[in-house]
Image (spheres, rainbow, N blue to C red):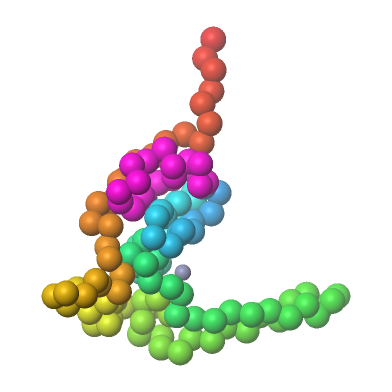
Amino acid sequence: MAAHAARFPSDGGVLTTASNVTYAMAGRYIALGPAGITRTTLAHEFGHILGFSDAYMRGFRDLGEDGYEILELVPNPDDIMAAPGIGRVQQRHFEALISVPGEPACHPPPFIIYIRSLPICSSKRE
Ligand SMILES: [Zn+2]
């Protein structure tokens, strides 16, 4: 996917298809998979393009024949970066994007989002 994203201009974020699952690469792209996506999850992934990290923690433990035990900690379910399904954009997100005169913003936004669907590989037509 990194090679695919490299086909887009480097001065902005990318929203593209061409993935088997939806995920984001922080500061660079959202790769949409074929499954449906909620508006809040898309907003969460967009937050990654703007430089925000996940605000939840997830771990797992191998239980052998019983599968895996997954533990997820959501410190603030109102925060879109902590709870992609139900959270909302918080004031802290806007504040992080606004620069103080003389100081760079915590998360300088790319300002440009390239939205395009490109094929993963070219096919030869006969
Ligand atoms: Zn995330």
Q: Report the span colored magenta.
A: 1-18
Above or below, 101 against 20 in this view is below
- Which residue is at the far front? 102
Q: Position of residue 40 (x, y in %)?
A: 35, 69
Question: Is residue 42 at all visible to an observer of this figure?
Answer: no
Above or below, 74 against 9 in this view is below
User: At 33% from the left edge and 53% from the top edge, which residue is drawn?
Assistant: 13
Task: Compare residues 80 and 2 and report the one nearer the observer.
Answer: 2
Above or below, 38 against 88 in this view is above
89 left or right, relative to 35: left
Task: Assess whether residue 2 is covered by the magenta stretch.
Answer: yes
Q: Position of residue 35 (x, y in %)?
A: 49, 54
95 left or right, relative to 7: left
Task: Compare residues 44 and 101 and report the one nearer the observer.
Answer: 101
User: At 24% from the left edge and 71% from the top edge, which residue is drawn?
Assistant: 104
Question: Is residue 68 at all visible to an observer of this figure?
Answer: yes
70 left or right, relative to 74: right
